[in-house]
Image (tube, rainbow, N blue to C red):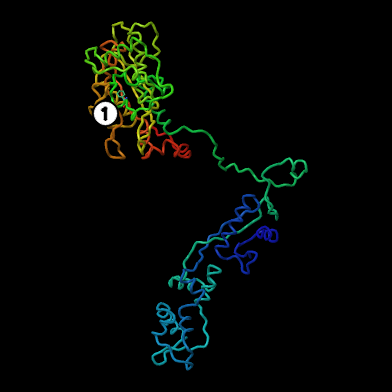
Amino acid sequence: QLILDTLDAHSTIQDTRSLVIPGQSDPAVSQDAQITILGALNSLLSRDMVKFETREIISHVLTPEGSQIAVEGSHEARVWSALPAKGEGAPVTPVQLKKQVGDETAKVGQGRAFKNGWIGKEGDGLVKLTSNIKDVTQIDLLEIQSSGTLKSGEKDLADLRKRKLIVQRKGQWFTVHKGPEFSTSTAKPETDLTVDMLTSGAWKTSTFKKYNFEAEGAPTEGGSLHPLLKVREEIRNIFLEMGFAEMPTASFVESGFWCFDALFVPQQHPARDLQDTFYISDPPHSLHPEPEYYKRVSTVHEHGGFGSTGYRAPWSHEETTKLLLRTHTTASSAHMLYKLAAKCRGEDVEADVRPAVGVSKESSKDDGFRPAKLFSIDRVFRNETTDATHLAEFHQVEGVVADRGLTLADLIGFMRVFFNKMGIERVRFKPAYNPYTEPSLEIFAFHPLLDRWVEVGNSGMFRPEMLEPMGFPKDVRVHGWGIGLERPAMIQYGISNIRTLLGHKTSIEYIEDSPAPML
Ligand code: PHE
């Protein structure tokens, strides 16, 4: 209002340091006051009510020591005050003076007070020589405090700077003119055109706030993909570009038959314990598997066959029909491989397994076999104690290739290519044991951030005890491998606790703000 009224009276304000802010006796010369004025100017400028130019100046402000002198007087004045007038009381000894005014003030003040002729020696002590003094230092500092400068000029300023009582500071002041929307009213412009304004006609005289086309819009609310789904999408794309077809994996609930027996996992295997597997209580049992296939599977377990001696352990029908939450996606792979072998079994069905791209060494045999490259990425469940790196439900990435005459070298070569596409250049394989594969390999990847090898998955050539009961011809080999999804995702996002990624402790902001990792 002060700015608008002054402009109204004088049409320009040459120097904003001449303004007298209401409630203050002196003009607004200090930098603090100019900053307040700048705030008001900017707000008036945004409404086109004023225009202004900024002038740069060097101003001065007091150091802490300077501020103390402005309040208490200079060291020399404090020394002078502490002494008796000549002939009026006992002279003060230097030791007493130090006690009274402090070491620093006594030391600095004495010399200057002597030089100014304010004090003199009497015997061993000091006395006043004048009855009043003019404390120029204090007066100058008070002037600088209120105006930022000294009328007496640069020489005195330089002296005070050398004494470290003041420092230079960049300052500014402003020259102000009327703007196109100048008015003396600071009433806030309207932001909305209301029904009331239209009916009363107030819109004709109202001022409206201008649109700010530079303003950023409010962020839009919307769903966002979970980081794990983004990693899944990127891995899915690698499979697709390598000619793989995605397997259906919607059934989280499987029977012991498909999760274990069909894979030649012995019925006594520890993985089938209650401690490792979640069993379903209602309903507890699956329907009976297809009888002929079931017979071949139970026989190869109990008595052997297809060149194998089998486990020669008692077979439990109860065990095979138990319902459970699948412990690996290899259960789904088993379903698909069984389907893939349908024609080989002589069944008159069009196997709805998509043929693979770029696989087979052509075969002249007409035994119904079609090569396939299949993958899945989905959830599995294990009855585990959870910690920073383990959850009871997690995701597996699984790839399966079926073709005639595949070798272990095909499996290793394929995995190297695949991991390379994921950005993992260094992979290593270690012989391992798996009930359904032989040979089996554990997969290790070099983790550059951790600077060590970490186990990422498991792989192998499926056993004839698994493939031949399904009906595959003897020369058909199937290799497969599985890796977790969470671990690569944690590596990609640089997080060490899986709960940051999954579960009730995950923050929505984290989910929304995490970009796709770009494998
Ligand atoms: N099912 C294995 C696992 O859960 C992974 C695997 C898949 C191993 C296919 C070999 C072949 O670790």
Rendering coords of residue 229 (x, y %): 43, 30
Percent from the top left, x then y, of residue 169? Answer: 49, 63
**Horizontal side of residue 392 vs 442, given as left or right:** right
- 32 is higher (above) or lower (below) than 92: above
Q: Residue at x 70, y 41 (%)?
A: 193
Badge 1 crowding class, 10 Å Cα cut-off, few under 14, some 14 to 19, many 20 or more, is many
Q: Amino acid at mark 1?
A: Glu
> Residue 140's spot in the image, x, y percent?
52, 74
Q: Nearer the viewer, residue 413 or 203?
A: 413
Query: Which of these two is toward me, 422 or 211?
Result: 422
Tally of numbered tags: 1
Vertical relation: 374 (above or below) 214 = above
Please tell me whether mark 1 sits on a helix, a strand or a loop. Answer: strand
Quadrant location, ligand no. 1: top left
Write down the residue under mark 1. Answer: 442
Position of residue 439 in the picture relative to residue 75 (left or right)? left
Q: Residue at x 68, y 48 (%)?
A: 189
Seen in the picture, residue 252 relative to 356 is either above or below; the reply is below
Choose between 322 and 430: the one closer to the eye.
322
In the rendered image, the quadrant that contains the C terminus is: top left
Q: Quadrant of the N terminus?
A: bottom right
Q: Residue at x 50, y 61 (%)?
A: 170
Residue at the bottom extreme, as displayed: 87
Q: Is disc 1's CB within 8 Å of ligand 1? A: no
**Residue 215 falls in which quadrant of the image?**
top right
Q: Residue at x 64, y 60 (%)?
A: 13
